[in-house]
Amino acid sequence: AVRSGLIRLAAVAKKEAREIMRDPITLWIAILLPLLMMYLFSYAITLDVRNITLAVADEDGTPQSREYVAGFLHSGYFQLHAMPPSASALEGLLDRGEVRMALTVPPGFARDLQQGLTARVQTLLDGSFPNTALVALGYADAITESYEARLRRQVLQDRLGKLPREAEAIRLESRVRYNPALRSENYIIPGLFAVILLAFPPLLTALAVVREREQGSIQQLYASPIRAWELFWGKLMPYAFIAFVEMLLLLAAAVLWFDVPVRGNAALLLALSVLYVLASCGIGLVVSTWTRSQVVALLLAVVLTFMPALLFSGFMFAIESMPALFRGYTYLFPARYFTEISRGIVLKG
């Protein structure tokens, strides 16, 4: 009975594979579109905040103020947009969205430094982009502290002729593990494995049964001796194979094109991805049995797979930062688990 069941399962899988091969355009789209999605997401989504548009009003115009401003321009994080002669023009630049940050160095900046007084500068930030504003503020603080430290050393050297050895009360030594270069690609691309494999395969399998129903051939399946599990797995296997090929291509692109190192066992990642693509294709097949039209099946598959994969997998948003209700909701989606698996194997080994 088991042997005959496997024979019937293979027959269904062969029939489904033949249906897929009759539409080579859809097949190539199913294989190449995930690569295009990885390419676009990897370059469009970045956690690095750079090229922050900056306007500077240096009302002091002294060598000291120019040196301070140069710290911003040479940092690699800011891009100079305008240098109006007075600070009154900065508000307009911010209001029009031309810059994300404005820096004002008031008159008397160098004089206050020479007299040992606190020299004040002002930064205005566009808070409509909170993450950029917060990171830009951190950059500004670091640049200011670096400039202040250089001034202290210069003053000591001028007074004493040499720099004294200073005993440090605390020295912080930091090391970044798993992603020392802090490359966004190393973090984003392993997460994309989970998102892409839960986005495209269910769209294909969501049409498997509903297409038979629309064509009227589902009645022949009902009249045949095929059992439910044979039909389910027979429909599933060709699409799972396509999804696994997608995973192989995504992994190859990650290593060869994006230079993402795989520190762990790549064979283990591929083995676990087989379970993931089976679950992914299974979701689409269940959707296909619920619906009566291909349009509804596609829409429902997107709602149940792609959107949760983006929002509740930890790919974009940290699960720990979500409200308790939504943290529990993430356990319902396989993308959460595969995101942790892929990042753990790729980044941590």
Image (cartoon, helix red, strand yellow):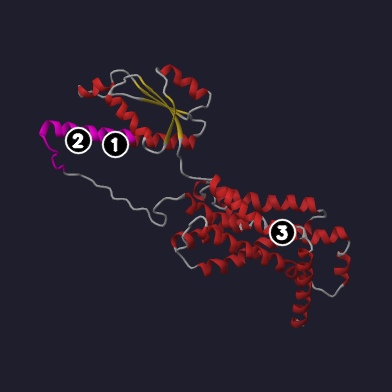
Query: In the image, is residue 158 part of the stretch drawn in magenta?
Result: yes
Image: 156 above or below 169: above
The dot on residue 284 is: 3
Looking at the rendered image, the quarter that the C terminus falls into is bottom left
Query: In the image, is residue 145 part of the stretch drawn in magenta?
Result: yes
Name the residue: 24% across, 20% down.
111
Q: CA distance from mark 3 to mark 2?
A: 66 Å
Instruction: Determine crowd level at label 3: few under 14, some 14-19, many 20+ residues with C-alpha closer than 10 A.
Output: many
Q: Report the front residue among 310 and 54.
A: 54
Closer to the chain start, of discs 1 and 2, is 1
Instruction: Determine crowd level at label 2: few under 14, some 14-19, many 20+ residues with C-alpha closer than 10 A.
Output: some
Please, what is the three-letter code of the amino acid marked with disc 3?
Gly
Name the residue: 53% across, 24% down.
96
Q: Of discs 1 and 3, which sits in the foreground?
A: 1
| Disc 3 secondary structure class | helix
Callout 3 touching callout 2 (CB < 8 Å):
no
| Disc 2 secondary structure class | helix
Closer to the chain start, of discs 3 and 2, is 2
> Magenta stretch?
143-166
Please, what is the three-letter code of the amino acid marked with disc 2?
Arg
Q: Which residue is mark 2?
A: 153
Please, what is the three-letter code of the amino acid marked with disc 1?
Ser
Q: Of discs 3 and 2, which sits in the foreground?
A: 2
Q: Which residue is mark 1?
A: 146
Q: CA distance from mark 1 to mark 2?
A: 11 Å
Instruction: Determine crowd level at label 1: few under 14, some 14-19, many 20+ residues with C-alpha closer than 10 A.
Output: few
In the image: residue 29, left or right of residue 148: right
